[in-house]
Amino acid sequence: MPEMTDPQDALKLFQRAFREGILELRRCSLEPDLWVHVDRVNNHFRLTYAYLDGRTVTAFAVFVQTEPHEGLPCFQVGYAVPPKFRKQGKGTAVVKSAIAEMEHGFSRTAMTSFYIEAIVGRDNVASQRVAETVLLQKGRETVDSVSGKPALAYMRKMGA
């Protein structure tokens, strides 16, 4: 059986590409300590946000546009914090700040509302806390579509 997608793997790849100078990061508008990389993956819009300490990523959140929900754009979020920086609130901070940047940026376009979705492994208590704090809800029971493992789904409408 395949494993559930782990944002920690994406964090490691992002960290390596950043150190090798492959990624172009831009400083965010609302929070100058937050950086963003914008690209497309499998023809889906992707926004990757990171807090940095020099050339080290201390917290990471990636938002990939998925199928619309109730006629509005939807972004699935994954987030990770390197072990050395955990238990400091960095996961919650990077997701909250990234969503604020998205709302600010999208407000200058026709996209005034959108959804954020998180699918979190049933055994990942730390990530469940981040999702509950940021998306302001308890997760609903689901099964991860990739691994078939038990998970919790969170979804929140953002913007107007």
Image (spheres, helix red, strand yellow):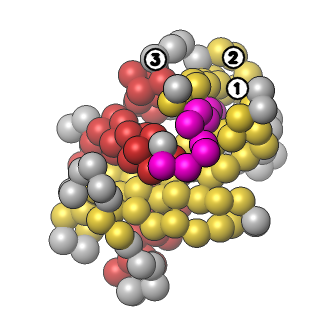
Q: Is residue 137 left or right of residue 145?
A: left
- Report the residue marked by disc 2: 141
Q: Mark 2 near mark 1, Cβ–Cβ under 8 Å? A: yes
Where does the image place residue 42, in percent across and percent down from the top left? 76, 66
Where does the image place residue 43, in percent across and percent down from the top left? 76, 65
Q: Is residue 152 left or right of residue 56?
A: right
Tell me which numbered mark, 2 or 1, is placed earlier along the sequence. 2
What is the span of residues highlighted in magenta in the rendered image? 108-122
Whether 125 is drawn above or below 51: the answer is above
Q: Secondary structure at mark 2?
A: strand
Q: Which labelled disc corresponds to residue 150?
A: 1
Mark in front: 2 vs 1 = 2
Q: Residue at x 51, y 30 (%)?
A: 159
Q: Secondary structure at mark 1?
A: strand
- Report the residue marked by disc 3: 136
Q: Residue at x 19, y 64 (%)?
A: 53
